[in-house]
Amino acid sequence: MSFQMQSPMLVVGIGGAGSKLARRASDILECDRLLISNDKGDLESPDGDTPQSSRSIRTMAVGTGAVINPTVGLVRAAAYERIDAIREAISGHPTVILMGNLAGKSGCAICPAVSEACAAEDAKLVSFAVMPFGHEKSRLFSAGVALRRLRETSACVTVVDNDSISESNPDLSPRECYDVAEAAVMYAVDFVTRSELETGTESLLAAGRNRDSLEESLRDALKTVYGSTSTGAIRHSVLYVAGGEDVPVGLLRSVAALAEGVLGGGGGNSVPDAQITTAETASIQAASPDESRVIMMSTVQGMAKFEKYDPLGAIPTDKMLDWSTPECSIDCKMPDMYQLE
């Protein structure tokens, strides 16, 4: 079943990285915005938010009391204390775009709560999830469980895998990896808001670095997407070429042909209608005129890499006694045992 995004839309940003993405996306789309985090610093705009008479711009702090370094379960419990306020902010928006960094506590903890609120308000949820680096071992399990919940509750979900970006570009710093991911997400937002989407769609978002050669940037993107999934899992890909209106048509044709050759050459995959868009013809201006990079959004069947993050993922949800309610810390109201997980 397909659907189109409807106005008024609401962009929800969770945590620091999610809030940064949500600010840019809501400004581009000129729609309402809600930022949620357990760290008040994440909610402060570096440039300050200018009041918009036509848009609602809200922030919501999820407090954990005197706990300085809260667990994911404790942050989620605090989020559920604000669930009525979250539902109120979502109410009246038929489409919600959720952006969360599942490598952070806020993203892992609050994203499932927001997705549950969207379901309760009968809002179509379009999720963008940023996954942790492979060396962040302590975060993989929580990120895998949170992503699994998003995949079940979202009309469509798009994943950005920092681990694959870093593997494809080992000389990049974590900050530079986030910059590559951020630029890719902005193009993906433009695509999904202008397209008719299939319910249940799962996509991987890959991006090449800013290169002198578009072919090199395409190779970066291909290495990234194949670092996140198997060859036969890709069903369809959409390409964005950012490089300004002066990119030769022949070069665009060459990049499209190269992508079709790689993606269509194995596992029965095909790219039936790869779309080439320059920064000037897209509805957003995410690239500077001197940029030269490729962004690839690939629809996939299954996300085996991320399912491995959750060793219990093989158990069907209908066989789990507590899957319907995300795990949270429990306040026992006992002086010697105030928190139970």
Image (cartoon, rainbow, N blue to C red):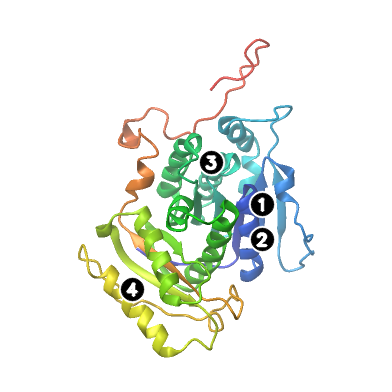
Question: In whole angstroms, how far apart are the C-alphas of marks 1 and 3?
Answer: 15 Å
Q: Determine the CA span between mark 4 and mark 3.
A: 34 Å
Image spot of residue 174 (x, y percent): 56, 51
Q: In the image shown, does 47 or 165 lie closer to the viewer?
A: 165
288 in relation to 144, above or below: below
Label 3's element?
helix
Tag 3 residue: 108
Q: Nearer the viewer, residue 246 or 285?
A: 246
Kindly identify which residue carries mark 4. Answer: 259
Q: Height in image: 320 above or below 261? A: above
Q: Residue at x 37, y 65 (%)?
A: 222
- Mark 4 vs mark 3, foreground winner is 4
Mark 1: which amino acid?
A: Leu
Disc 2 versus disc 4: distance between alpha carbons? 32 Å
Q: Horizontal and vertical percent for residue 104? A: 57, 42
Residue found 72% across the figure and 50% down from its top = 43
Mark 2–mark 3 Cα distance, whole angstroms, equals 19 Å
Q: Looking at the image, is mark 2 or mark 1 nearer the viewer?
A: 2
Q: Which residue is mark 1?
A: 35
